[in-house]
Image: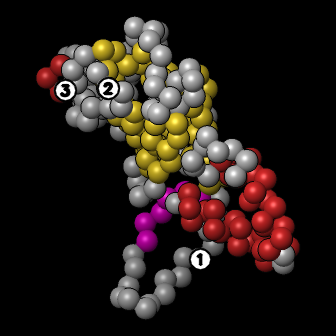
Amino acid sequence: MFGYLFRLVFGALAVLFGSSIILWVLYNYLVKRQPEFSGPRFFSGFGVALPTQPVTTGADGTKVELGDLATKPSHIIQGRVVLSDGKPISSRTRIYLNLDDAYDSQDLLLGPDGEFEFGAIPSGRIELTVRVSNYRISGKNPNKDWLNEGQIVGLLEGDLQDFVIHLEPGARLNRDNAPAGVEEQPRDKPLRGASL
């Protein structure tokens, strides 16, 4: 979806401005300028996203009329990954954000202190995945997915600042290690970070 939105916005700009030079400048100034971010940071400044919507396609060669595509406010998740023993996180550690109701994702390298920021995220169910050798997502994360190690799942309803993902040394935790009364896969629970 992020890639589609990227093409949609640039296509609209091309029609409005009629110049590929303007698009080249925008792309090189706004997108290529931030090499540490592999997702479409370009959209963070617009503050909008296309919400996911089901589409049924026909046979090869047929066209589907989508009608007007309305944008909705988008959100950011800004936070950090914290190791409980205080050790530094490898500079090659990636974090992934997947839209649960669409086949789309963003990923980026964690910063030197484990920090990250995802932008242009539509409201809805998401998955955050991070894996560090010899560490696991701790039970301090209220949205820990007990069925899939390394994942945080939940419902994104607005911007999240200072979102903490807490990792602890040890073997993976699974549903047998879940505390009593904890939801195994809290996909419809509002997304919240760990409290330290």
Q: Are marks 2 and 1 in contact (CB under 8 Å)?
A: no
Q: How is the image coloured?
A: secondary structure
The residue under label 2 is which amino acid type?
Ser
Q: Residue at x 74, y 71 (%)?
A: 12
| Camera-side mark, 3 or 2 | 2
Q: Dot 1 corresponds to which residue?
A: 67
Q: Secondary structure at mark 3?
A: loop
Q: What is the chief secondary structure element of the magenta stretch?
A: loop
The region drawn magenta spans 50-55
Residue 183 at x, y percent in the picture: 27, 28
Residue furthest to the bottom: 61
At a point 49% along the width and 44% down the height, the residue shown is 107
Q: Which residue is drawn at the image coordinates 21% and 20% (left, top)?
A: 171
- Residue matched to label 3: 174
Tell me: 24 left or right of 135.
Answer: right
In the image, taking residue 77 as reference, residue 195 lies left or right, namely left
| 64 to 190, vertically: above or below | below
Outermost front residue: 91
Mark 2 lies on residue: 133
Residue 47 pos. (x, y %): 70, 47
